[in-house]
Image: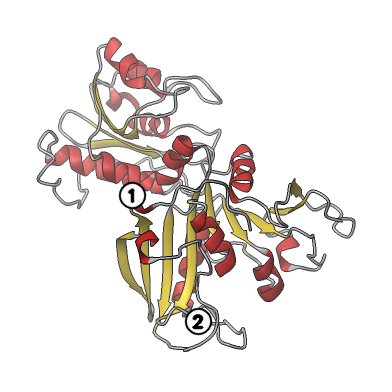
Amino acid sequence: MANHAAHAPHDAFGEPEPDAHVDAITGADARAMRRAVELAARGLGSTSPNPVVGCVITDAAGTVVGEGWHERAGGPHAEVHALRAAGEAARGATAYVTLEPCNHTGRTGPCAQALVEAGVTRVVYAVPDPNPQASGGAATLRAAGVKAEGGFLEAEAAAGNAAWLTSVRLGRPYVTWKYAATLDGRSAAADGSSRWITGPESRADVHRLRAEADAVLVGGGTLRTDDPHLAVRGVEGATQPLRVALDTRAALLPAARILDDAAPTLLVVGEDADTRHLPGVDLLRLPLHDGRIAVHDLLGRLYARGVRSVFLEGGPTLAGAFLEAGAVDRVVGYLAPALLGSGPAALADAGITNIARAVRLDITEAVRVGTDLRITAVPVPEAVPTPTAPKEH
């Protein structure tokens, strides 16, 4: 990631006015907070297990005097970067932060106290911190005489921090399922060939999304059919995600592309799998149920390793297992302007037997990427299936 900004004072955001229903926030407040949301996004893929956070500091005239974002876990938080950029100009200033300033000492000190010591007199934050170990920053600020206001543009900031917020709430990583298909929903031709359904622009876009995730996940079928590499290419400064491969019988060959040193790799196998032909490979052994690994067992173990977001690139069977387990939080589909008429569908059995049980989605974005269409959607909360037992794959 690039270094944090230390800009000369400026006040040109180029941002739209706040939504009409937000009547407690000024146009200047909205522009500053939206800039903080933009800055926070620069940390995607580099801050786990911490959240992404952006901070903008303005003086009494509304001029930006400092900006920053949380760049990496263990490094200074967004507020500290912004305060360093602001220097003495922070005294009497307003700080706009996408997440309630933290109130605890971990690898870094409490940001709430740093803001107090810098002489900031007003703090506007978007999302209250749901982490009980770090919350309470607003109360600390108010106790020190700082005006602290929360909930401004909360939905916009929360959307940018969805992975971390979901992981805190559910105790498992946030899962994005990505697929590529023709307009008639085929992920490959009848002979199994699938390169390339989508165009080069879509493939480059996938690397951008990989770079924003902590882990990229595929199953045994994809390993055998495609021999995927899964490392990020063409994204400057990207932190390579953990490549996770599900291979219950450890049938992976030592020459597989996923085992090179371009990015870290974790091979998930059954408890009794023979892995003697894979010396030095990082292994995660999990119990099998009817020959398969339970989705939530896997996600729980990844969470314990600090993984807060998973980019699911497996085939239709693995996607169906995750969907039936209620473990898909976002869907990103790349639709190519092509028709095949036969061949595997993008999604296999997900335990849905009638139209009433269909997983309904809310489309949050639809954009053209090269010759393809990228659709992003999230499950409608009422439609997310609640599994009675973890789905296995």
Q: Which of the 4 image quarters holds residue 226? A: bottom right
Tell me the CA gap for discs 1 and 2.
33 Å
Residue at image coords 65%, 56%: 243
For disc 2, the marked residue is: 197
| Disc 1 versus disc 2: nearer the observer | 1
CB atoms of marks 1 and 2 within 8 Å: no
Inspect this view and state whether residue 237 appears. no
For the C terminus, give its image quadrant: bottom right
Image location (x, y in percent) of residue 246: 68, 58
Image location (x, y in percent) of residue 90: 29, 25
Image location (x, y in percent) of residue 45: 51, 49
Inspect this view and state whether residue 321 appears. yes
Residue at image coords 59%, 40%: 303
Type of residue at label 2?
Ile
Residue at image coords 62%, 37%: 304
Q: Which mark is residue 104?
A: none
For disc 1, the marked residue is: 382
Describe the element under mark 1 as helix, strand or loop: helix
Which of the marked residues, 1 or 2, is nearer the chain's N terminus? Answer: 2
Say whether residue 303 is left or right of residue 221. Answer: left
Type of residue at label 1?
Glu
Q: Is residue 197 above or below residue 350?
A: below
Describe the element under mark 2 as helix, strand or loop: loop
Residue at image coords 68%, 60%: 262
Image location (x, y in percent) of residue 17: 13, 48
Instruction: State the residue in front, 11 or 40.
Output: 40
Q: Residues within 10 Å of mark 1 (few under 14, many from 20)?
A: few
